Image (cartoon, rainbow, N blue to C red):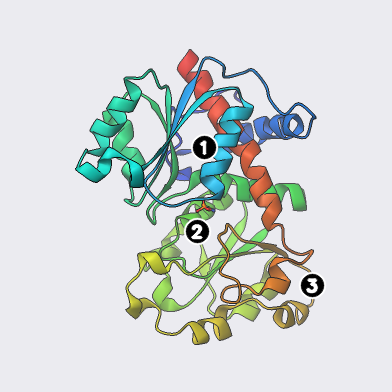
Amino acid sequence: MSSELSVNHLLGIKYLKREDIDLIFKTADHFKEVINRPIKKVPSLRDITIANLFFENSTRTRLSFELAEKRLSADVINFSAASSSVKKGETLIDTVNNILSMKVDMVVMRHPNPGAGIFLSKHVKASIINAGDGAHEHPTQALLDSYSIREKLGEVKGKKVVIVGDILHSRVALSNIFALKLQGAEVKVCGPKTLLPKYIESLGVEVETNLKKALEWCDVANMLRVQNERMDISYFPSTREYIKQFGLNKKLLESLDKEIVIMHPGPINRGVEITSDVADSEHAIILDQVQNGVAIRMAAIYLLASKIKQ
Ligand code: CP
């Protein structure tokens, strides 16, 4: 296994090799041990400064990046677009170049525009981590999702994973499809036809519009939130109809001939894509996913920082 990533930025799973994922997981295994110790910090990145730039709301991603950076002993500054000079018209490149002039080495950015991280990586001198760019990619989410499957089921290769819900507007779905396929999993998507991208089958995934059939097929079901903030109402006419066809509830889960692992990237819209009794059941690994997010982000930051230091 290589000891360094093939990339200088983490912009999307699409740009990673299988060996990169293996290296991130191996490094995350080490950091998971570290954060389970009484002293949860290592001095690895005392010489690195990281700026977290969030142009969109976030709870899990923002906090787990900040915690990962602090566990690695990096210096951290946080930027929220809502309270910044972006509101006075400052451009993305000007904003980031001003931040970088304060001797910042790495930028973690969430942005509503697909490709914002890629654009930034071409115009500024810093390592960029995409923390979610519109409906494009959310690479660290997909890495922590695959890592959580590996932890629960031993490996990702050969596992059958169904991603259920609003695939069209989901960066989590796209990054998960790339990551799962790269590791040899079988992937299906399940959701209303209006919420499936037209190109979906070109990614090597099958479509199943019957949720019960999809669940009977899979080892893992990754339930996604309907991203109302990204869609025109015509895509999604009725919440009641959606719940009836694509909502996961206890009765449906108990009607299956087998046990499956339930995942959700959060935030959960309880009672829509998943009922509380399923989300809080022993089948769900939702909080394990969140916990693994810290180790995965420590690994990604550590490996990218190693390249900066060369
Ligand atoms: N899963 C995820 O990206 O959650 P947040 O939007 O809260 O960061």
Q: Residue at x 68, y 78 (%)?
A: 249
Q: Distance between the residues labelled 1 and 2?
A: 18 Å
Q: Which of 138 and 74 is in front in this view?
A: 74
Q: Position of residue 126 (x, y in %)?
A: 37, 25
Report the side of 284 relative to 47 (left or right): right
Q: Which mark is drawn over residue 17?
A: 1
Q: In which quarter of the image is the N terminus?
A: top right
Return the residue at label 2.
173
Image quadrant of residue 227? bottom left
Say if residue 158 shows up in the picture. no
Q: How far apart are marks 1 and 3 (CA)?
A: 33 Å
Q: From the viewer's perspective, is the residue at label 1 or at label 2 nearer?
A: 2
Q: From the viewer's perspective, is the residue at label 3 or at label 2 nearer?
A: 2
Outermost residue on the front side: it is: 83
Circle 2 sits in a helix, a strand or a loop, which is it? helix
Q: Identity of the amino acid at label 3?
A: Lys
Q: Identity of the amino acid at label 2?
A: Ala
Return the residue at label 3.
258
61, above or below 165, in the image: above
Give the crowd class for mark 2: few <14, some 14-19, many >=20 residues within 10 Å.
Answer: many
